[in-house]
Image (cartoon, helix red, strand yellow):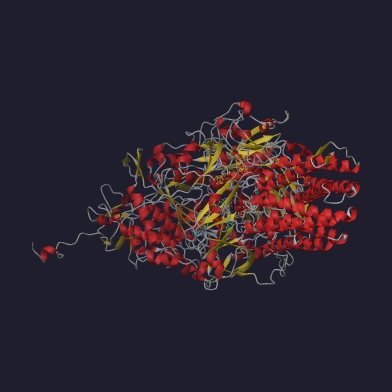
Amino acid sequence: MCPPAQVVTYLMQSIKTPSPSIQEVKNTTCYMCACRCGIRVHLRDGVVRYIDGNPDHPLNKGVICAKGSSGIMKQYSPARLLKPLKRKAGAERGAGDFEEISWDEAFATLAERLGKIRATDPKKFALFTGRDQMQALTGMFARQFGTPNYAAHGGFCSVNMAAGMIYTIGGSFWEFGGPDLDRAKLFVMIGTAEDHHSNPLKIALSKFKRDGGRFISINPVRTGYSAIADEWVPIRPGTDGALLLAIIHEIIATGLYDRDFLVKYSNAGQLINVSETNDEFGFFVRTEVPTEEACYEPQDKLWWDRNTDHAVVTHTAGADPYLLGEFKLQDGTPVKPAFQLLQERVKDYTPEWASQITGIPVEVIRQLAHEMGVTARDQKIELPIAWTDSWGNEHDTVTGNPVAFHAMRGLAAHSNGFQTIRALAILMSLLGTIDRPGGFRHKAPFPRPIPPCARTPNDPRAVQPNHPLDGMVLGWPSDPDDLFVNDDGSPVRLDKAFSWEYPLSVHGLMHNAITNAWRGDPYRIDTLLIFMANMSWNSTMNTAEVRQMLNDKDTEGPNAGEFKIPFLVVCDAFHSEMTAFADLILPDTTYLERHDVMSMLDRPISEFDGPVDSVRIPVVPVSGDCKPFQEVLIEIGTRLKLPAFVTKEGVRKFRDYPDFIINYETEPGSGIGFLAGWRGKGGEKFLRGEPNPNQWEMYAKNNCVFHYELPKSYQYMRNWNKGYLEWSQRNRITRYAEPILIHIYSEVLQRFRSAAQGKGLTRKPPEHLKKRIDTYFDPLPFYYDSLEAQVTDKHKYPLAAVTQRPMAMYHSWDSQNAWLRQIHTHNYLYVNTRTALQQGIADGDWIWVESQWGKVRCMARHSEAVEPGTVWTWNAIGKAAGAWNLTPDANESQKGFLLNHLISEELPGANGRISNSDPITGQAAWYDVRVRIYKVGAGETAVGVQNTSPQFEPMKPYPGMKTRSSILAFLGVKAK
Amino acid sequence: MHPAFSVILLTTLIGAAQGLFLALFTAQSYAAFKLLPQPDAHAFYGQGSLLALVLLVAGLGASFFHLGHPERAWRSAAMWRTSWLSREVIVLPAFMGVVFLYGLAHWLNWHPVLTTLPGELPVDPTAILGVAGTLFAFALFICTAMIYACLKFLSEWHSPLTVINYILLGGASGFTLAAAFASVTAPELVSFLAGWAAIITLLGWIGRSASLYRNARLKPKSSLQTAIGIKHPRIVQKTQGFMGGSFNTREFFHGQPVAVLRAVKWFFVLAVFPLPLLLLLSGMQGRTGLLVAAFAVQYAGLLAERWFFFAQANHPQNLYYQSIA
Amino acid sequence: MTQLALVIDLNVCVGCQACVTSCKEWNTAGSAGPMVDQNPYGADPTGTFFNRVQTFEVGEFPNTETVHFPKSCLHCEDPPCVPVCPTGASYKRKEDGIVLVDYDKCIGCKYCSWACPYGARELDEQQQVMKKCTLCVDRIYDTSMTEDDRKPSCVKACPTSARLFGDIHDPQSAVSIAIRESGGYPLMPEWGTHPANHYLPRRKTRIKIHEDELERADNPLKVDRQLPRPAMNEPTLDDVTTW
Ligand SMILES: Nc1nc2c(c(=O)[nH]1)N[C@H]1C(S)=C(S)[C@@H](COP(=O)(O)OP(=O)(O)OC[C@H]3O[C@@H](n4cnc5c(=O)[nH]c(N)nc54)[C@H](O)[C@@H]3O)O[C@H]1N2
Ligand SMILES: Nc1nc2c(c(=O)[nH]1)N[C@H]1C(S)=C(S)[C@@H](COP(=O)(O)OP(=O)(O)OC[C@H]3O[C@@H](n4cnc5c(=O)[nH]c(N)nc54)[C@H](O)[C@@H]3O)O[C@H]1N2
Ligand code: SF4
Ligand code: SF4
Ligand code: SF4
Ligand code: SF4
Ligand code: SF4
Ligand SMILES: [Mo]
């Protein structure tokens, strides 16, 4: 095929560039999105010319995506912030009147202000970070500072996914685990449009299809991945719980569950006290009282053995428990196996019932259940991998039931998401697919104990002036006593996370931070530092009002005339909507200009076969006066003399961020740091080991990634794999090597419910939240209408409105990208053709979309690929006029719109307002909103001014930013 | 297609010039056979050729505006074996040269008898140049028309009618112009030229009506089904892959509402055919004003006709560029 | 004779647009570039791209197929765009069938674009020459690259490997096998252009479950006494009849 070199023509000859140009290729890690692929950056004379995927990278294996390929246009974007800026005295927030300042001044301002706060009430400093990948550092900074008011994007992103699954199987989708499409035969994708694992999922999906696998997508909308599904199952948003419970019903009714798996590896056979009068009602019967408060589950529960017809301690050799039935213990206590309770729970959740709710035909629901059950049962995989389980039984093979699932925000972003996701995790467990070939696979450091060991403080006295916070900033409550509440039960945290309102809000509730701070509920703060989050635009609900809150001043009292949120610091790399509201803007570098660490202490890029972490290494010099935020944190930490950053004598410990990464250890001598690779003096150790001065070089030499491949026998069944658990204990990934049984029945939830029912010795919820806790903390999954639907007149607002990720855009970042914005310049509302025609709406018509919270004007597109009760649009394409250094007449602001205006961050609650979030986890319920649509009336848009509504005063470019050109011929930028 | 003004000017101007030349030489031939009086050669043929040349140069000039790289225009003669455009590029200057020489010969009254044909017909250089010019004029009509007619995907153009109409409409406007011109320089020829102009306009009317009739009934050969290779009666494009427009959305779409298209059609049908006919017939007697008006109306009509010619052509590529989202 | 081509597998293309921007990126910074963008930060931004990914909806709800459809120059075996070019700037290479434009000869008359039924050519508004997919001719023969890199930029980028590249005249090549075995087809065959690029259609995997596969002898419900055998004292035919 390859003709000799002489056929190379004109085109080839002209590639020979003039000689002095220096060509280089440097490896680093992409950050055009959170997927973190390996990239090769090709430079000519120091200028980026071409970015492609690194073929030697385990994640993307050489492929790249639309965003990754457009990194050049971000690096040289005119929207970049290039100078530290301070709001001009007297200027309103949002007006965008800034003046340049030096970093010295910025640091001095910050150190002084934060120093004062820390010395008085550290709570008054709140640090919230968006879609960043350095929560290990930002979280540690907050803790060192002593404030509990820290969270990252998880709470408004997909915490339901993490919590729902981790509280059930000890691991989850998202960045913690995923479907093993290499071996699966049937793949069911639910509510996923693009996901974090973008490139790897695409690689796997096409391979799966080519290998003859069957792919089913359950989604109200058919785009992207769903487009290539063998079968599309359109579903009404927010009703997946009903579908999954009906599938469970059918699987149990037909006996298509993996009994053996459930018996050995879950709590399905464990006996629960069902004596309603007993304080122990709903708890597992235990043989002994646990001696130590440890975060693992002792093996002290009972089975009802079939062979002896007696209660025995679980996993007793030779015993086989009944999964169904009702029994009486010797003391007369009535008990039932957890599985019996599950069967009772799903008894009425028939396919007929679910069909009414989901809009999916009964036959399809049955067919889904049968396909899953029969494939799992009849297409078993046996891999010749010997392993030993936690009870010492040796197995010659690893078995796989090749049904894989994947789900993301279509399940998570609803206020009934936690229970829905529990139902999914239970379904996956019934099919016997947890950490097995062809099913769900964990990624290190998962699986974790249920729940993981990290705890926040449970006492307001953990916050002390000039002291680090006594406990983790975020954690995993296991019972009411773990809640971070005041003595009266009120929240300690600004966002009310870990309070009785959202007890398991393991990622915080960033989406309520601004509203709460503005209202002073639970209290006022002084300084809000926002890093990498566009909280006045796409990551906030009720956007227009939140923008006002940011600019709102006290009218009376001692602070009359002062901002309600007194000091607002924004660290961003670009001219985002949020920056306009800052008092101080810290210009960050781009991903091509800085060191970064994707750490095992945060969310690494681990693979199914073992831990992987990775770094970024600068490939071009820092632009303008930008500074990596890491350096900023280390500098401020040092100036504030936070213990992690200075010696006992108060002397600076770390020269800079790379130095910090090499030398920081979680505790002196722990050998655990941010990076797991090439530890030890000479780089001979991994996971644990002394600091290695050449660690960065070793990462650089190895494609910026460290990949530890576990022995085959440690790669599966890790919840109960003795070898793996002990390995992970030895390497200090976990504290305990105890088996992690699947929680078909969640005792953690029962503890909260029991407290709400006034039982037991634990803390009790405040009166007004008792009913809420009692209702939602059901130890078995159940279906309920979303909280928003409960307070909506569904006849008035008949449609569900959702968004989804466009593959070629990352949130709000990419409208500045000259190439990507040509693909998505503005957005439409997609409406099922028949739904639209019923309203007399033609394709392309201007319409109003109205929820009970607000309305937006936009254009409609007919579509046959959307469920008739759903309307949708691409997420975050719409922009505020002038933002991102686009011209004020750019399509993004004039024809694009943001659905967030229709979504409220709060709902009317029993006792005033309550966050529009899952009552268990505090997950933001983005996809619960209900709307109606109608044509824009005649005269409502004057001729010629057809634009979207609402509109905002156009943002101006800031001092120090580059001017935008009107013609781009790659880097030969010419003005018209 | 997107009607480019440069191309509209080019084809209408040179069409008129070709027609004008043909009119001049027709008159000369009739005169040679004594069927018409000899006009003032200097004024009529000489200045007439000049007028044709001016139109040709203007057309050529306009065509340069169509090129991205006019300085490289010379290259476009290279592919005459395969490209009608290349052929046009060769024939057009050749024709201009002949017109120039023809005019010059008349201007200089250069009439050496080279040979005599049976019937006492003396053959002078103007006759030879006239015959050559006629051949070139027809060749040029064919080249120009074939540029469009050879594109088989553009079924509106891909028809002998395209060639016939280019000839007839160019001829009509040229003869009309000749009649107007003669009313000043050779009044004795006016009724002859106006008569022919009317006849060719009438033929043009028939020809163009035939193509309108044909085009209205065309069934596109390509469909979304063949364009993307999927068999289903209901296929709708949701996005063409970009939103702010591209060469594909600019070059192949006229960008006007149907109403404009319809209005343009009615305008040209009136302005190219019946109106000039009326004016020609009433101006037969040599009323310059009416004849100039006839040409002006017809030429304006032809601009519209050419615009419509392009706008009506529906390129199959448009199947791929229908929707943004 | 070699005919290089892309074969695009609609069965796995998820419409991610990676091929679009990686093409733009390689070519704008490489020998085919620059590829201008106009109004890059203003209203209606527009630019030159060699490859676009479009989306079609086929059928009616709920039986809708969403089809992502990438399209670049198809490198026709009988390319109508070539003979019409008056300058010879457009040409088809004998050695590998790639259709190219020589920017130094092109006068920007756009005629070739009229002659392409597929809308695969774009005039670069700044350089005023016709441009189109080059099949990355400046990659695939560049011996300074590793063998693995000597592939079109879009092919390397594509996360689903929906873009196959090779010689469709070599019956043993991966592309020929794919065309043969997976029903590869050309676009608008009615024009006789014989596009070298082919498309592979959607293919469906279905599972057939027979009624009797649902309940089996080893049904776990039996273990838990949920599918009990009838008790010995329940009536049977034995009680009511004799033979
Ligand atoms: N290109 C790109 N990639 C990204 C991002 C990006 O902005 N751009 N963002 C990243 C981030 S932060 C995140 S959190 C992930 C999110 O990744 P995904 O979870 O894949 O993202 P969403 O776009 O929210 O997709 C939600 C999907 O759920 C569907 N859906 C909505 N409601 C329901 C429902 O009730 N039931 C079901 N079954 N489906 C429903 C929607 O139609 C949509 O297809 O993507 C990450 N990756
Ligand atoms: N309606 C609706 N709203 C949603 C969602 C939805 O599905 N529908 N999804 C939600 C989800 S899951 C998420 S995760 C959020 C995401 O919401 P955000 O985290 O607010 O997302 P981005 O738009 O990515 O904003 C991050 C900011 O980071 C900046 N940035 C980019 N690169 C850098 C850098 O290198 N350094 C610094 N310092 N800053 C940088 C950008 O300029 C931008 O201002 O949106 C949420 N909002
Ligand atoms: S998926 Fe994300 S990390 Fe990977 S190449 Fe694309 S933008 Fe970069
Ligand atoms: S697709 Fe168009 S440009 Fe490409 S070879 Fe065929 S006709 Fe020519
Ligand atoms: S635009 Fe260029 S390549 Fe196309 S026909 Fe004209 S000269 Fe040839
Ligand atoms: S082969 Fe090269 S030029 Fe053609 S579409 Fe792919 S990347 Fe673009
Ligand atoms: S890169 Fe591949 S999957 Fe993505 S749009 Fe292009 S062909 Fe389709
Ligand atoms: Mo997210």
Percent x, y of residue B245: 67, 52
- Considering depth in this image, is A895 or C223 the residue closer to the camera? A895
- Considering depth in this image, is A366 or A722 the residue closer to the camera? A366
A632 to the left or right of B93? left
- A415 is higher (above) or lower (below) than A792: above
A187 to the left or right of A596? left
Residue pictured at 65% horizontal, 58% vertical: A878
Percent x, y of residue A447: 44, 47
Whether residue A646 is visible: no
- Residue extending farthest to the front is B119
A123 to the left or right of A437? right
Percent x, y of residue A154: 55, 54
Q: Identify the image quadrant of the C terminus of chain C.
A: bottom left
Whether residue A423 is visible: yes
Percent x, y of residue B310: 70, 53
- A644 is higher (above) or lower (below) than A858: above
- Considering depth in this image, is A47 or A316 the residue closer to the camera? A47
Q: Choose top left, top right, bottom left or bottom right for residue A856.
A: bottom right
- Considering depth in this image, is A333 or C77 the residue closer to the camera? C77
- A65 is higher (above) or lower (below) than C94: below
Q: Choose top left, top right, bottom left or bottom right for residue A630.
A: top right
**Which image quarter has ligand 7?**
top right
Q: Identify the image quadrant of the N terminus of chain C.
A: top right
Q: How many discs appear?
A: 0
